[in-house]
Image: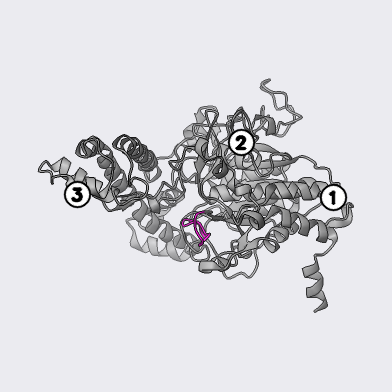
Amino acid sequence: MKKVLLAAVFLAGFSFSQAQEAKAKSIDPKEDKDLMTWYHKDFSGSKVYGVNTENAYKYLESKGLKPKTVVVGVLDSGVQVDHPGLVKNLWSNPNEVPGNGKDDDGNGYIDDVHGWNFIGGKNGDIDIDNMEVTRVVAKYKSVFEGDDSAKNKANMAKMPEEFAMYTKAKEIFNKKSIDASQNFKTYSMISELVPNMVKLLGGKPVTTETISAIKAPTDQKDAIAYQVLGQVSQSPEFKGKSSAEFEKLIKEQMKEAIDYYAPQSKQYDLSYDPRKEIVGDNYDDYSEKIYGNNHYEGPDAEHGTHVAGIIAGLPQGKEVQYGIASKVAKIMTVRTVPNGDERDKDVANAIRYAVDNGAKVLNMSFGKPVSPGKNVVWDAFKYAQDKGVLLVKAAGNENEDVAEHLAYPTNFKNVTDEQPFVNNVLVVGASTNKNAALRASFSNYNKKMVNVFAPGEEIYSTVPKNEYKYLQGTSMASPVVAGAAAVLLAYMPDLKPAQIIEALVKTSNPNTENGFGDYSQAGGVIDVKKAAEYAYTNFYSGKSSANTKPSKSVKKAVKK
């Protein structure tokens, strides 16, 4: 799912902080160029938990290594392929003639010059789609809760796995659909009250003193606006702002909230299904692979464009933003994620498409709580592993232990398993530079099932219309790690996915404050330079046989 976590603002007893992925902060990037690139910093020198990007390049080049281009597949909402900060680092299919309406390379996809779109078709592109829990409830409600109670019980006994999934999905559906409706009404009401709040301020700044001096209104709308102002005056985001600044900021916040909650009327609508009309495939046929179109951007490519910039963005004009692998990576865009939950069939096909067309690292900044087609996705995971392709996946933004609340697709078939069923999946949590706790407040975590953490809060990157924006979420942390993996592969192309994972986990900069050491295998934030040193020392010899060389930690284990 392409998720949006709005900034935490407490209004009338409600908070955005429970939403699922961070939207833009009210920051003027032109005023803080240091913040724009904080995630590249060297921790040893700055004490900021960046990933040490520049020193990684210096180290690898000091060894006389020459980089080879690494194709990184971005499985996401779409990418603005002509963005000035991305256009030079975009993958182009060498065997496809642009715009001739033919499948020149014979892979089944016509004019797939920069990638493919699995959520589009001849009738356009999907924007809003259901949540997966909606699809599950719609499919199984009549099966388990039909008019014939005896038949219902028989179906429960005959399909225990489906019934368990239905029960979980129904619980989430009931809660989230009600919350969405209530939140939409709340923020719409507050939006309507903005003129009343501005009137009550009377041109004065938002301070406790200003609010205290306001005579309690007798008009009902003004009275509610007064209550909201009382909450706002205590919020760091609004406190001290001028009346004009307050008006501008609160309108932006309310628009973000309304834009987030409005589509959910469709996402949680049991009768809504855009798939057949737009894509035109037989959705229940998981073996079907040839469908979609080459509309790389789609209706809303903010999320995917931002992710792509974190991996391989290039400075342009006055912008100093650059991606972790900007010197070595090319972006292949595979549109997979709508405004709603991604579908398992599309995820599996997107993985196979990217692997078959030469991507060596795939970024997957999405997730959901139930997965009817998890087996077909797991088959795709195994396919990628067999081809030596690394999958980098966001841990999720629910502030939950993923062992207790699975975020599909997962590389653990059962939470009780000691090891993942494949060795090519790297799961990433989000860190912050704002406090000693280090874990971003929204990030999921688990000592066994999350491998590493990486910067994911206040990340500045490319967005559509040739613009840039701060976004936050594990969706931003994942491409930081995907970019790091691409850097290692560019200079040491024989590295296996498991070796890249080991190098990043073993060399993360540790932090034990506030339990951070127990939130992932690494217990810290990745350091690309240290990972490069580890990989070079333990795995690289300049020969193709280098990837069979065990690490020192493995040698010690064998000796013991």
Q: How crowded is mark 1: few (under 14 residues within 10 Å), some or many (20 or more)?
A: few
Element carrying mark 1: loop
| First along the sequence among labels 3 and 1 | 1
Q: In this view, does 491 lie to the left or right of 110?
A: right
Instruction: Specify whether residue 19 is in view.
Output: yes
Residue 437 is a magenta residue:
yes
Q: Position of residue 296 (x, y in %)?
A: 59, 32
Look at the image and tell me in which quarter the C terminus lies. Answer: bottom right
Q: Is residue 445 left or right of residue 488?
A: left
Q: Which residue sits at x=58%, y=29%?
A: 295
Q: Nearer the viewer, residue 239 or 149?
A: 239
**Marks 3 and 2, how far apart in space?**
44 Å
Residue behind mark 3? 212
Label number found at residue 417: none
Q: What residue type is labelled 2?
A: Val
Q: Which amino acid does label 1 sit on?
A: Lys
Q: How crowded is mark 3: few (under 14 residues within 10 Å), some or many (20 or more)?
A: few
Residue 552 is a magenta residue:
no
**Marks 1 and 2, how far apart in space?**
28 Å
Residue behind mark 1? 63
Q: Where is residue 87 in the image (x, y as percent from the top left)?
A: 65, 29
Q: Which amino acid does label 3 sit on?
A: Ser
Magenta highlight range: 434-444
Q: How many labels sit on residues?
A: 3
The vertical placement of 452 against 303, above or below, is below
